[in-house]
Amino acid sequence: MKTKELSDAYQVLQEASGLKVGDRVKIVRELPDYSLGWGTCWNSYMTAALGKEGVISAIHATNGFRLSPFDYWFPVFSLELIKPVFIPKKFVLSTDYTAEVTENGTVVVGCQRIKPELMKQIMAAVDEALRLINKTEGYIPERYDAEVRVRILRSITANQYILKKGEQLKDGDRLYNDSGGSTLTGKIGCEVGSPGADYVYVRTKS
């Protein structure tokens, strides 16, 4: 689905990723055509490149990242940075949105300038990406803001998924707290979303 709102939200998320020309990335997942505001289509040659590495040779606001040697445009949600190189900088994503990338790569959002409508679009796009990637309606507490949702999205891998509300926690499940930091859960047997377990939990597929 293509709408201006999704396209705007995609551009914000792509800028927040910090990926740049020269970065080496791995193609980790396939996405539907025009998904989440991405401006172009997925093809069979891109599917054949899954699991391979490439170097970002060009960046387009909505089409995503052109990779060498594949010469196709990939969406930000399909890529994983191989050797992250963070350069501290402050930049303006739009007239209503500012952000700063710190030395450790954290994206600090200038919340005082974000319109509520844009924030809703960003959070909706991130939630849709999480559902597409995990093929599940994973539980995310409403208190988790857009920046934290982006951080969780970028940290989970193709062989992981977010647990649904009510699922019982097992040994090895990871808890993602309100700031996006993760740790092994100590609530084995508790139900996701219950008191004391009201967080995002991620499980590795067996």
Image: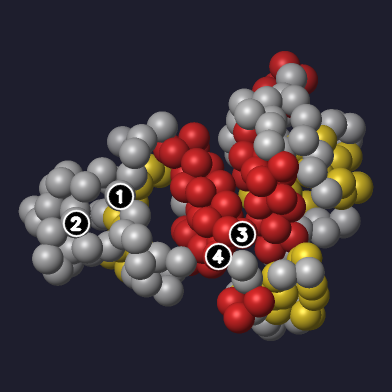
Identify the residue shown where x is 51% and y is 63%: 146
Q: Nearer the viewer, mark 3 or mark 2?
A: 3
- Helix, strand or loop at mark 2: loop
In this rendering, the answer to whether 166 lies above or below 103 is above
- Helix, strand or loop at mark 1: loop
In primary-sequence order, the first of circles 3 and 1 is 3
Question: In the rendered image, is residue 65 in sight?
Answer: yes
Question: In the rendered image, is residue 14 in sight?
Answer: no
Q: Which residue is mark 2?
A: 193
**Spatial separation of the CA atoms under disc 3 and disc 4:** 5 Å
What's the amino acid at mark 1? Tyr
Identify the residue shown where x is 63% and y is 29%: 1
In this rendering, the answer to whether 24 lies above or below 32 is below
Residue 26 drawn at (x, y percent): 68, 44
The answer to which image quadrant residue 93 occupies is bottom right
Q: Are marks 3 and 4 in contact (CB under 8 Å)?
A: yes
Q: Which residue is mark 4?
A: 116
**Spatial separation of the CA atoms under disc 4 and disc 2:** 26 Å
Residue 198 drawn at (x, y percent): 22, 63
Q: Residues within 10 Å of mark 4 (few under 14, many from 20)?
A: few
Q: Is residue 200 left or right of residue 158?
A: left
What's the amino acid at mark 4? Pro
Q: Which residue is mark 3?
A: 118
Name the image quarter holding the C terminus.
top left
Q: Residues within 10 Å of mark 1 (few under 14, many from 20)?
A: some
- Helix, strand or loop at mark 3: helix
Residue 79 drawn at (x, y percent): 67, 45
In primary-sequence order, the first of circles 3 and 2 is 3
Q: Is residue 167 left or right of residue 55?
A: left
In primary-sequence order, the first of circles 4 and 1 is 4
Identify the residue shown where x is 50% and y is 41%: 128
24 or 76, which lies in front? Answer: 76
